[in-house]
Amino acid sequence: MQLFTQFSGSPSNVSNNDYDSSTGYGVRLGYLGRLSDSISIGAAYATKMKMGKFDKYKGLFAEDGGFDMPENYNIGMMIRATPALSFGLDYKRINYNDVNSVGNPSTNQAPLGASNGPGFGWQNVNVWKFGVEYAVNSALTVRAGYGKSDNPIMARDVTFNILAPGVVQDHYTLGLTYALAKNSEITMAYMHAAKQSVTGSSLFNALIPVPNAGGTETIQMYENSFGIAWGMKL
């Protein structure tokens, strides 16, 4: 990031400034109800979370270090097909574009840190999730799910998103809960996000005097996670 200090409104607040922190506020509202014995619905809405500025990096992030959390909303439904088998469907919308440091195109012709300065260029995304749960017996419940999201990163913004290559779109999950005793249970879950990549022209093409010296760049990501939890019913 040192190369970019010459394009910042605050060159000493671009990189190598250790940790920074931020606190903020916002509102989240939700509803959960049952339409019938077999159908439940839920919905939630979260305003943009207004966060304090990252002062140590006000020369990197737009709005002098601003980094609000985006507005989002979702709606879902659970259908109990049988006493043992249930299906769930969920839709979520995340409005990244409304946060300048996240949504501003990285190609913006303005100093880093300015309100209209370069950002990550993330587009608003739609996220769909589908899940199934099956009670094998009174002790064991197994689950599986699939999630599909839009890719928020465009080819023009590949260079800036080397910092945050959030390009994965397909998520697969497996899990189970097993009752160890009457009031004790263990839950395990695994998630795999399939490999996804985006390729685009390097921003360095415009910074280096030699034409096309930066060439193209590719960002790529895949993810695996595993969790285990123990719970007690009081």
Image (tube, rainbow, N blue to C red):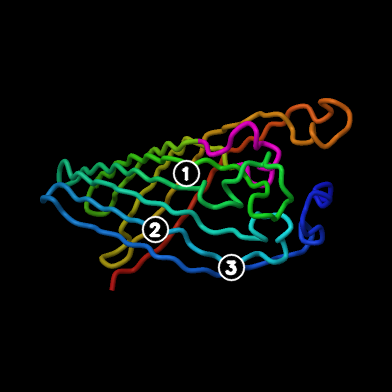
Q: Residues within 10 Å of mark 3 (few under 14, many from 20)?
A: some
How far apart marks 3 and 2 lie (CA) works out to 18 Å
The label number, if any, that marks residue 46 in the structure image = 2
Residue beneath disc 3 = 52
**Residue segment shown in magenta:** 151-165
Residue type at mark 2: give it.
Answer: Ala
Q: Residue at x 66, y 60 (%)?
A: 65
Q: Residues within 10 Å of mark 1 (few under 14, many from 20)?
A: some
Looking at the rendered structure, the secondary structure element under dot 2 is strand
Q: Nearer the viewer, residue 173 or 196?
A: 196
Residue type at mark 1: give it.
Answer: Met
Image quadrant where residue 202 sits: top right
Place of residue 31 in the rendered image (x, y in percent of width and height, measured from the top left): 25, 59
Place of residue 219 in the rendered image (x, y in percent of width and height, measured from the top left): 66, 35
Q: Residue at x 70, y 55 (%)?
A: 113
Residue type at mark 3: give it.
Answer: Gly
Place of residue 199 in the rendered image (x, y in percent of width and height, measured from the top left): 66, 29
Place of residue 64 in the rendered image (x, y in percent of width and height, measured from the top left): 67, 61
Instruction: Give the prevailing secondary structure in the magenta stretch.
Output: loop
